[in-house]
Amino acid sequence: MEEEHRLDNAEAPLLAAAATKPDGAASSSPTRNKYPFFCAVLASMTSVLMGYNVAVTSGAQIFMAEDLGLSDTQIELLSGAINIYSLVGALLAGWTSDRLGRRLTIVLTNGFFLVGPLIMTLASGYAALMAGRFIAGIGVGYALVIAPIYAAEIAPASSRGLLSSLPEIFINTGVMLSYVSNFAFSTLPAHLSWRLMFAAGVVPTVFLAAGVLTMPESPRWLAMKGRTDEAKAVLDRTSDTLAESQQRLLEIQEVVDTDSNGAGGGAWKEVATKAGVRRVLATVLALQFFQQASGIDSVVLYGPRVLAMAGVTSNTLLLGLNVLFGVAKAGSILIAMVLADRVGRRPLLLVSAGGMTASLLVLGSVFAAFGGAKDDAVVAAVAVAAVVAFVCTFSVGFGPLAWVYSSEILPLRLRGQGAGLGTAMNRVMSGIVTMTFISLYGAITMAGTFYLYAAVTAASFVFIYTCLPETRGRNLEDMEQLFRTK
């Protein structure tokens, strides 16, 4: 019985070792194949660069303002504009990945993360900084689309939640590393410190791009291009059993054949003619809206500023606490990775939305009651605890699972374009939140700002409870039927 679950040693000896059961293992439950995990990890490493480039301005802005004389308005625009610029990459990523393939699109993404930060490192003024931010922003859009798509398409159903969560944990690893970079270089002269913060993200891009070329192409993309034999070979290497590989191929081929025999109109004809597909697309857009309208990126990009207004006065302490936030945010995603395929997406999303609402209410109340207090250790401690609770509850659910849920419910022909639209919604909302945060709290106070975010997260709880069916353990090609019949 063990031989039924063993991969072809002649074709892929390393993969066979990963997929083979230990001697004496029971044959009733096939061992999970480890190879898709390694592929998804390598593809998701691009997300480390994405998280780093988005969040590095959190601490760098202190020294950029000192060195280049940037105003609050310029800092606000520079910090948030990368999210708007990422729309270019997000909208192109679906088209690019459907033509070049998922793998080469990841390589292209690394190229943007090489050029953009290099320009910012060498910048002598605001215009050059914004130009580098634009190029890096295109890479952000690509990374947000292509990493979850590849992870979802390479993974068997048994581990899809785990593997689809990898891009999010790697994004947050990048965020954490940017905070560490902020802290590590903060003692250097201002004109040097912020440049080294940006430069630290340049070197890994070349090595990651080379590593990605060793990965297999997505089997779904290969099937879409009529390369069925290649798709079958990849599925054999990435499925838990050969029987599962055959079943996945049949399901993919059925969808591809149905699409190719359809009467013109392209992928978007499905949106106009199928109510289930329209509901799927609306769900993807709503999830991405709520994820960013919660205000998470305000904390990611302006954490030191928030704590300074809560009474923390030391720059070193501010940047050190920012590292704490990064560690808490990245570490909490491990919970989602472990539980997504065990308890399901829906329960984790509900817990996440409820916890975010409660922590934002506490944070808003701290500013309402004690705003303006200086060096009050108790007030600062409560504010820090509320921020930590907010980022942790976000990362347990909404952070990774908005992407997991979105990537797995989209129909095959619409997956690239649909993921691009969802990412566009995500980046628009992130841009709006981050480019207005300073102005917003100036207009309605810091307390009012966090109360507003709490109202949004409360609405997201209602949306999840009433509109989202569970998708755990279902094949990707079944999702449209699930939404049509639910």
Image: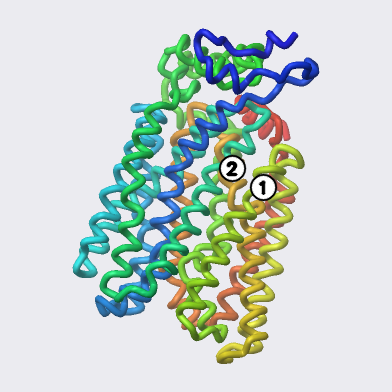
Q: Tell me the crowding category of disc 1: few under 14, some 14 to 19, or many 20 or more residues within 10 angstroms, Cα based.
A: many
| Residue 417 on image: x %, y % | 44, 36
Q: Is residue 213 above or below residue 137?
A: above
| Residue 66 on image: x %, y % | 30, 80
Residue type (three-letter) at the residue carrying disc 2:
Ser
Residue type (three-letter) at the residue carrying disc 1:
Ala
Q: Which residue is mark 1?
A: 336
| Residue 199 on image: x %, y % | 30, 57
Quadrant for the N terminus in the image? top right
SS of the residue under disc 1: helix
SS of the residue under disc 2: helix
The label on residue 215 is none
| Residue 146 in the figure: left or right of residue 381 | left
| Residue 369 visible within the image | yes
| Residue 410 on image: x %, y % | 55, 34
Q: Which residue is mark 2?
A: 165
Residue at figure coordinates x 47%, y 53% from the top left:
174
Mark 2 or 1 closer to N-term?
A: 2
| Residue 160 in the figure: left or right of residue 322 | right
Residue at figure coordinates x 59%, y 13% from the top left:
7
Image color mode: rainbow
| Residue 196 in the figure: left or right of residue 149 | left
Residue at figure coordinates x 44%, y 64% from the top left:
432
- Residue 230: quarter of image: top left
Q: Are marks 2 and 1 in contact (CB under 8 Å)?
A: yes
Residue at figure coordinates x 53%, y 27% from the top left:
154
- 139 and 202: which one is in front? 202
Quadrant for the C terminus in the image? top right
- 3 and 337: which one is in front? 3
How far apart, in angstroms, are the residues tagged by discs 2 and 1?
8 Å
